[in-house]
Image (cartoon, rainbow, N blue to C red):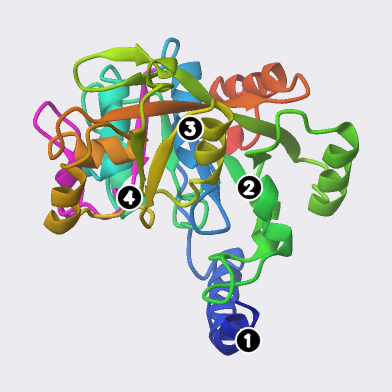
Amino acid sequence: MCILRKILWPFSVLYGLAVKVRNLLYDREVFRSVSFDIPVICVGNLSVGGTGKTPMVEYLVRLLKTGFHTAILSRGYRRKSEGFVLAGPETGVEELGDEPCQYHRKFPDITVAVDADRVNGINRLVTAHPSPEVVVLDDAFQHRRVKAGFNILLTSCDSRYTGDIFLPAGNLRDSRKEAKRANVIIVTKCREDMSTAKRDAILKQLAPEDHQHVFFTTIAYDEKIDSAATTIPLTDWRKEHFTLVTGIANAAPLVKFLKDKGLSFEHYNYPDHHDFNEKELKMLRKKSRILTTEKDFMRLKDRLDGIFFIGIQPVFLFGQQEEFDRLVFQYVSGKGAGSEGN
């Protein structure tokens, strides 16, 4: 891997230069960012995948949807449609992509849409009926055409952006310096028993600015698993060997969770957002019990019978949940960071 990084290093230098020039043009307003008259919350990262954006978007929806008509706007990665698509009764993975399809299934009472052009997407949402009172942008921190009023930057505890380098030798798709644009930085996928000494060391490394708030979260997997037809306790599979199928950026936490539960399984690990081909599906159809992630379930549920998925939620550490919720509500109600621009 070290040799490969050395080979790829020149390409990372070129990529990083292009990113920095682009950001400079936005900073000097040669490229213009667009603000909106409604609260826009952006959830994103500086690296590619694996920081827990989807659970955080879902957390925000649960937090806001009872008090505000909420909309999610996503790019719709690897969808087969183009342009703006509004989720409806007949839209599926091919039109929306796996994550937006998951949002639509879990939250049928909110608006879900996809558009690679975030400005156009928001404009279409605010002219729809009913129009949203707050828009959550999924994976849009690097898309500077939209000037979100509240930016949430995620970084995985074990692979923080502070020690990373640009693609393709590393995982960064944006400059580390851009972290300064975040209102909130969340260190995700921490150990549940993280010590205060570890927390303080990470805080020192992140070196947040005075206006920034830093939070720490861990992963909580559901104790029950779901299929299209039923829900059962995960412990029902304790005496049965099964197949785990994952197509996410980092399956290691899920694998550890299942092993810690004493479960017996084989693991087929595919790339993030993997598009399963017929050969792979034929092989999987021979398996008697299949467990997958909720995101993968959206791509597989109509192609494999009897497949189950396990849900996931972020859990705030060090008693920080109340403070995070307060900051979000403060912004959405017009009293917080960036509200004067929205």
Q: Front-most of 109 and 127?
A: 109
Q: If you read the primary sequence from the N terminus, does the residue marked by circle 4 or circle 3 appear first?
A: 3
Residue 64 is at least partly visible in this image? no
**x%, y% of residue 105?**
26, 25
Look at discs 1 and 4 and give the one toward the viewer.
1
Q: Please give the residue where the numbered disc 2 appears in the rendered image.
A: 156
How many residues crowd around disc 4 within 10 Å: few (fewer than 14), some, or many (20 or more)? many
Q: Residue at x 31, y 41 (%)?
A: 296
Q: CA distance from mark 2 to mark 4?
A: 22 Å
Left or right of 100 in this view: 51:
right
Closer to us: 149 or 105: 105
Extreme front residue here? 239
- Dominant SS of magenta comes to loop
- Residue on which disc 1 sits: 6
Element on which disc 1 rests: helix
Residues drawn in magenta: 69-95
Question: What is the distance, in whole Å, between disc 3 and disc 1 at their CAs?
Answer: 34 Å
